[in-house]
Image (spheres, coloured by chain):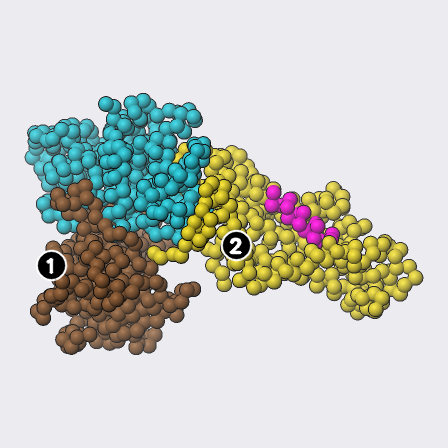
Amino acid sequence: MSADAAIAGSAGHLLDVRDLRVTYRSNNGPVPAVRGVDMHIAAGETLGIAGESGCGKSTMAMALLKLVAPETTVTGQILLDGADVLTMKPGELRAVRWTKASVIFQGAQHVLNPVRKIGHQIDEAIVLHNTGGQHDQATRVGDLLALVGLPRRRAQDYPHELSGGQKQRVMIAMALACDPLLIIADEPTTALDVMVQAQILRLLTEIKHERGLSMLFITHDLSVLSSIADRLAVMYAGKIVEEGPAKGLLRGSHHPYTKALSAAFPTIGDPASRFAPSGLKGDPPDPSSLPTGCSFHPRCPVVTDACAAIDIQLKAPTADATWRAACVHVGGAA
Amino acid sequence: MNPLLTIEDIHVTYPPRRRGGGVSRAVDGVDLEVRAGEIVALVGESGCGKTTLARAVLGLQSTSAGTVRFDGSPIPTDAGGRKAFRRQAQLVFQDPSGSLNPRQSIYEIVAEGLRIHGINDGEPARVAEALSRCGLRPPERYFLRYPHELSGGQRQRVVIAGAMVLEPRLLVADEPVSSLDASVRGEILDLLLGLARHHQMGILVITHDLGLAWNIADRIAVMYLGRIVEVGRTEDLLADPRHPYTRALLSVVPEHRSLDEQILVGEAPDPTEIPTGCRFHPRCPVMHSNQAEHLGIFDRCRLVDPGLKSVANGSEGHQAACHAVEIRS
Amino acid sequence: MTTPTIAGPSNGPPLKTPRQVTRARRLLAARRMWAQLRSDRAGFIGLIVFGLFVVMALAAPLIADVSELRADAGRGRPNLAPPSREFLLGTDGIGRDVLAQLVWGARVSLYIGLLATFVAVVIGSVIGLISGYAKGRVGSLLLAVDDFFLVIPFLPLAIVLAAILGRSPNVLAVVIGVTSWAGSARLVRAQVLTLSQRGYVERSRALGSRGRHVVTRHVLPGVAPLIIANATLIVPAAILTESTLAFLGFGDRNSPSWGKMLGDAQDAAAITQNAWWYFLPPGLCIIGVVLAFTVFGRALEQIFNPKLGGR
């Protein structure tokens, strides 16, 4: 890690992650799912993380609150509001979960308990953390539902009485129950139709601005991030391969993987992509047997001889650049 | 020349799920054509009936009214004729993992169609040819593999190879890339494009993704609640969408900035309770913004079902089902 | 994804005909299964123990004379004599060799256990397959029959049937089989229902296949492992049922099974006289076979259906 990043890290970032590594166990030995991630989120900022299945984005997000399977090792530093999540005792950890940072999980239908009223399920988080007096809990649940655009009486409904979009709204209400500072949204719109996805994205954007929340938004669809994220980070094989301001990165990216990822979702009306679907050869790598050197090199359209040998670290092309990428083609050379 | 596939006023209904429930009109009068060598994208949200329509086209779902013509003649209803038709028209599924039997080797999966249709000559050669045409080369390396040993993209290639081995003339692909990783989609779409261009196959792609349609489709049909509400050449329809539903769909595509974002309220209603008049009117921005009243069609939208009509000043074949589009012309 | 090539033209002879491909695949599958079974220690030991019992049953004529089973065989010998050089497991209440009864009893117990299982599995699979595949009236009728056999207490039913139909080993096996198929029919039906929802069945239909092809190519191969695994769990239950019936006196008087030996030992007051050599060996044999087959069955179930999650 560079010196200036360390200084920036101590200066008022809500979340500061340094050299995060997550390794889980499988029958075939340890699997490095996250391999050294540095990132930070300022108060009120939204960081978007994009990547494909198996790139470690969800594992990383869950590791931020130490929501990992037993026997999974998490190393590095996760400073959440100044305190390191990884050195916390179980009791402290429970207190931090939901009051400091909460999670909107993917697949609402699997997360909601089918036999309990949704009001109770939202209530649960409030009761567990004992925030606010007990008398106004019903009001609080109603307020939360209203906040996410659902009628207050929906508290009396069971999950199966709601549509997919409404369930996702309930998930958001649950995440907001304890007034967290940071929301970790793990593919919150993936299973939804385009129109409902747009509704949810708009809702999240509104709530975020209204409450000054920070957000970590994880998705496989780079284009979704354009409307919601301030900064973007693209992950591949457990590492961030490019990061920078969202607008700039979507307009012109620098890492060949980011380019391929954004081309996979074509701009409608762009003659270049008409009758020319673009993708990469091969498949995303298996985390248990990663290629040597730059793990992207077997699929890279601009691979050089050096790529199989050296694993390039994230670097900025110039001292004052706002973006960084992990590619030999970045920063003068080639 | 006859179109390869002609769908004429197809209706599919499902009986009520519960006592007292309504009949579900999943497909409610659809007309559509697919020509040889042409890719048509059928676009809509989940529950709009697009998958039911696909199954009905292939005779996997019985229809309550209407005709499906293949090569100009209605698809046969007798067992033998139906089987012969199945050889010509194949289906590619959304979830490649589920549509491959985990106990069968890739060879057996691809050869299954040949065995069903009693094609015995040169089976290994045909299987190898189909696999390599779908980009699995050298094909022999895959013969003894099992589906779980392949990646998602490779599995979808196996599914397509299993369809291709019968040398069909029509392919119906139901969300062929929605379960695949973004970087893998391109290859599969390229494969479909090649099949249409080089083998004169007619392809009907079912999708919710307008970007996919822009990538490969010659024409687009937009479906809403069991009915096609707008159809036209891809360039015309995406550059100049007329139906308010198409406009809304297009406006919420991220990064698409030519239209003001227009998020519809609510979710697609239940096909057991299709609204009167224009089926889109309860969610229609034209109704909500008083434009309908202004144009003097408020009651017409609520009471009269608009049919698909050619749009004014549009290109050939561009049709929309909307009173407002009609009156403005 | 990088997966190792398992076998094929690259490291074997080139495959020319479809039959060769199929054979190669079957060989591979069999090898893989065998390797999996070998790695499951308990299951493998179970298989060996069961194999030893089968050898003992088959080798009965070599170990002991069949004439020892006759009621008058023990005339002139001491009753309930402890193990000696002459009678390794002592004598029973009427002076006969216990070892001879034990090895010949293995034949009867295993024969009835396996035959009963065969009967139960055939009835269970056929009814399960039909009730899962046929919708409508046939399906619900078969389901009702299945429910009936599932809830009815099987021991009284078996006793009644044995009393009516007679007591030869074959009849006993059928009686036990008829009372224990309901569970496997349920299992098969559930599996058939799941399988028919699978994408590959739909795909097969789209390719142009009809009912028979779907059943023989997709449903049966999917159900078969379950049927086999389930059968290995019925065997011990059937052996126990046979022992219970024989112990209670509903067995065949002329062919000694382990259960009958226990019943006789009870009648001869072997326990109060501390003649452990009489009641312990058949008891241990029953426990041994049942245990061996159960762990073997569990191992098979693991192999065929890894989703059960082994713990």
SS of the residue under disc 2? helix
Q: Residue furthest right?
A: C76
- Labels 2 and 1 touching (C-beta < 8 A): no
Q: Are marks 2 and 1 on the same chain?
A: no
Q: Which residue is mark 1?
A: A248
Q: Which kind of residue does numbered mark 2 sit on?
A: Arg
Task: Return the residue nearer the eye: B265 or B80.
Answer: B80
SS of the residue under disc 1? helix
Residue B121 is tagged as none
Position of residue A231 relative to residue C141, above or below, is below
Specify whether residue A26 is painted magenta: no
> Residue A259's spot in the image, x, y percent?
18, 55
Report which quarter residue C42 is drawn in: bottom right
Q: How many marks?
A: 2
User: Callout 1: residue from which chain?
Assistant: A
Q: Which chain is yellow?
A: C
Residue ID at (16%, 34%): B233
Q: Which kind of residue does numbered mark 1 sit on?
A: Gly
Q: CA distance from mark 2 to mark 1?
A: 56 Å
Q: Does residue B280 appear in the picture of this structure?
A: yes
> Residue C281's spot in the image, x, y percent?
74, 64
Span of residues in magenta: C106-122
Near mark 2 (Cα within 10 A), the count class, few <14, some 14-19 or many ≥20, is few
Q: Does residue B224 appear in the picture of this structure?
A: no
SS majority, magenta: helix
Colour seen for chain A: brown
> Residue C163's spot in the image, x, y percent?
75, 45
Colour seen for chain B: cyan
Q: Which residue is mark 2?
A: C31
